[in-house]
Amino acid sequence: MIQKRIAQWAVMAVAVPLAAAGARRLSHKLEARRGPTGVSRLLAQGADLIRPQHAKRRRFF
């Protein structure tokens, strides 16, 4: 039972933020290449749903 809780915590603490960051990065790359599209907006919205505290921060580089 404790192992199951540790595995759930690991997924929530590590995998979910990484997925959100990957979706946001992919969204920015797509927008840089092709401009804003429905797919890039969906990726950004999905990342914002998962990690809303980083929704307003946008890197320009």
Image (cartoon, rainbow, N blue to C red):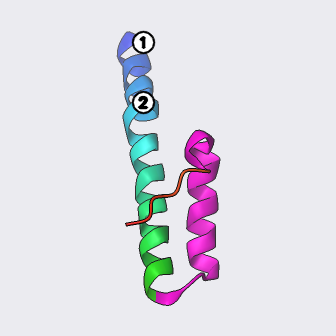
Position in image of residue 22 (x %, y %): 40, 57
Tag 1 secondary structure: loop
* Residue drawn at x 61%, y 83% as measured from the top left: 37
* Residue drawn at x 46%, y 32% as measured from the top left: 12
- Circle 2: residue type: Ala
| Vertical side of 18 occupied by 36: above or below | below
Please name whichever residue, 2 or 25, is drawn nearer the observer in this view of the structure: 25
| Vertical side of 52 occupied by 45: above or below | below
**Residue 15 in the figure: left or right of residue 41:** left
The residue range painted magenta reads 34-55
- Report which residue position mark 2 lands on: 13
- Report which residue position mark 1 lands on: 1
22 part of magenta stretch: no
N-terminal of the pair, mark 2 or mark 1, is: 1
* Residue drawn at x 64%, y 80% as measured from the top left: 38
Tag 2 secondary structure: helix
Other-residue count near label 2 (Cα within 10 Å), few / some / many at <14 / 14–19 / ≥20: few
